[in-house]
Amino acid sequence: MFRSFLHHGATNCEDCAKVCCTKIEHFGVKVGELTIFEDVNIHVHCGQLTALIGPNGAGKSTLLKAILGEVAHNGNLHYVDAKNQHTGHPIIGYVPQYLTFDVTAPTSVIDLFMACLSKKPVWLFSSKKIRQHVIENLKRVKADHLIDRRLGALSGGELQRILLALALDPVPDLLLLDEPISGVDQNGLDLFYEIIVDLKAQEDMAIILISHDLEQVAKHADQVVLLNKKVLASGTPEEVFNNEKMKKIFGTIL
């Protein structure tokens, strides 16, 4: 599991100085003769949210997997610090769209953290050694009260906040969110975005979010990237939503 950058309206790092930046350069994925996407270039800056949108089959989730290194791909990934120095591969946090598990199992939230944060089998050490650490992580996503809750008893929104807390340990340079609130109710959705807004401000974190909720994208994104096998448009929500290629795919949004 992976634990664990965009200037407003910009997709290049010409002015990366004094702003840390992750550069996704010339990314492409092919499966046999089938091109999933090609020559994708996205630069995302710390403290801002990039929304990745596009039709089904556009290659959005595959792009995140390529960034994670889970899918063979062309291209390079570079992290540049605020002094414009290449510092190697960024620390990446990842929240999937859903977690597949046995909902009838007695596994609790603390059990999940213990399994993910330790190399030892969970039954070989006491949860007391890690409990306070987990509580602090859960507080960041407003979920510390869920520490002893059974995973199968969590709502969709609660589970996604637990996965987010895991992705934030250690704090990543780049946080990838693959439709993390699909099927979550309105209260859960509002809370999730509230947490994301706090994270990008307080942790100066770069975030890439895949979403089909264009209303929320318009409200919260600093930059939008329209992907359909390649980058068709990028810029502020208003710029992209008024782009003719966007209108052709989704219709008039703003």
Image: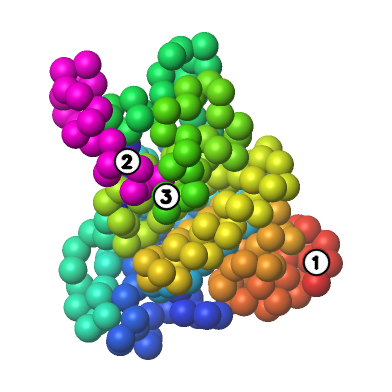
Q: How far apart are marks 1 and 2 (CA)?
A: 41 Å
Rate crowding at label 3 as few (under 14), some (14 to 19) or many (20 or more) other CA atoms within 10 Å: few
In the displayed structure image, the side of residue 20 where residue 165 appears, left or right: right
Q: Could you say where residue 119 lies in the image, as x and y percent from the top left?
A: 16, 29
- Residue 91 lies, with reference to residue 5, above or below; the image says above
The segment highlighted magenta reads 117-138
**Dominant secondary-structure state across the stretch colored magenta:** helix
Q: In which quarter of the image is the N terminus?
A: top left
223 or 112: nearer the viewer = 112
Q: Which residue is pictured at 58% across the width and 60% down the height?
A: 194
Q: Which residue is pictured at 42% across the width and 50% down the height?
A: 139
Badge 3 is on which residue? 139
Q: In which quarter of the image is the C terminus?
A: bottom right
Q: Looking at this rendering, what residue extends furthest in the top direction?
A: 104
Badge 2 is on which residue? 134
Quick check: marks 1 and 2 in contact, CB under 8 Å? Answer: no
Q: Could you say where residue 46 lies in the image, as x and y percent from the top left?
A: 39, 72
Badge 1 is on which residue? 253
